Each structure stands twice: as C-alpha cells, then as structure tokens.
Amino acid sequence: RTAMARGRLLRRLLVASTVYLAAQRVLSSPCAFAETGPPSGRISPEAPGVGMFGSLVEVCIFALFAAVITGVVAEIVLQKVIDFCREATWWPRAAPVQKVLMQNFGYPEEACDNEGCLDCYAYVLVMCGHHVICGSMMLPVVIYGWEGVGSMCHSMLLVGAMMDVAIDVYHEFKMACRLFFFEKV
C-alpha cells in the first residue's frame, strides 16, 4: 500500500509539473492557429488573468495555501453531509450497496461498517461537488473561447484549475495520513 501511495503521489506531481511546463510553453510560443487567434498571433503572459502566477514557486505556494483552505472547508462540509446522510430515510437501503462498492475497491471487511460506508459515501459527494464548482468556473472560457471572454473569466479559469489542484493536494495529504498514522482521519 505504501509503495502504491508513493507512486500515485509521484505521478500526480509529474502530471502537475508537466501541465505547468506545457502551459508556459504555450504562453511563450506563437499560437498554432495564428489566423484565428489574437491579432499578434500569440497569447501574451501579460494578458489579463494570465500573469496571475509568475513562476512555479508562486503556483506551488498558491496551491498549498488553497489546499489548507479547501481542506478546512471540505472537512466542515463533510461533517454536514455525513449528518444529513445518517438521518436520511434512504441511507439504510444505500449502505449495503456502498459496502459492496468499497469492498470492490479493496477496503477490508472491518472498514466497511456503517460509519466507514457513510464516511466514504459523503467524501465522494464532497469531492464531486468541489469538481462541479471548479468546472463551472472554467465553463465561460470553454464555451466562448479565450478571446470571447474578459479578464474576469480568464482569472476564473486559472483559479478553478488551481482549486482543482488544491483538492488533489488535500486528498493526497488526507490519504497519506490515513495510510501512515490513522485508520480514520
């Protein structure tokens, strides 16, 4: 389990650094579609919203800061969702299905008690809700294109992407704590 967790963390770090380097390359190279792109044929790093993060260090600092805030908010919301699901009339019917799902993902039988199933179910709901929020922040640029929106939407895209990175950092931290220190964090 430890080797798998380390491998996942290393893969995510590799993906994050590759995405950052690719974004830097795109921002500093001529646009592939110069005739349909901006008049200069380039997307300038000085364009509104693009220069928010000047270096990889600033990206990492923002991601760590956002991960702390995201983690606190996610844990508060997680408790609210757990309380809601615990009292829901449908939970006794959903718990066996969640237990089977958890066992299919390799959870041991003793971890699949009612509280474990409730925690896992609520955690997935919170993560999905966070991804919906992040994706919604990116939609204007996806729908209308970079040039079709203003600097507010440019910034929303970047913040949405960084919020998605922040939830990954929070998730990896929580899973590492579960793996090395506690069964339930």
Image (spheres, rainbow, N blue to C red):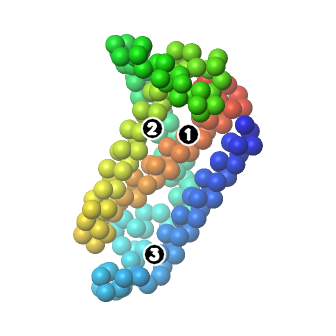
Q: Which residue is mark 2?
A: 127
**Where residue 27 is drawn, which disc sits there?**
3
User: Camera-side residue: 88 or 13?
Assistant: 88
| Dot 3 or dot 2, earlier in sequence | 3
Q: State yes or no: discs 3 and 2 in contact (Cβ < 8 Å).
A: no
Provide the secondary structure element on which disc 2 rests. Answer: helix
The image quarter in which residue 179 lies: top right
Which x, y percent locates residue 80?
Answer: 40, 22
Residue type at mark 2: give it: Met
Which residue lies at the image location 39% right of the left edge and 52% below the top edge?
Answer: 160
Is residue 21 positioned above or below 83 on the image?
below
Determine whether, in the image, residue 66 is placed left or right of residue 172.
left
Residue type at mark 3: give it: Leu
Residue type at mark 1: give it: His
| Residue 57 visible, this angle | no
| Dot 1 or dot 2, earlier in sequence | 2
**Where residue 15 is drawn, which disc sits there?**
none
Quote the CA–CA distance across marks 3 and 1: 29 Å
Which residue lies at the image location 64% right of the left edge and 31% below the top edge?
Answer: 106
Determine whether, in the image, residue 39 is placed left or right of residue 107.
left
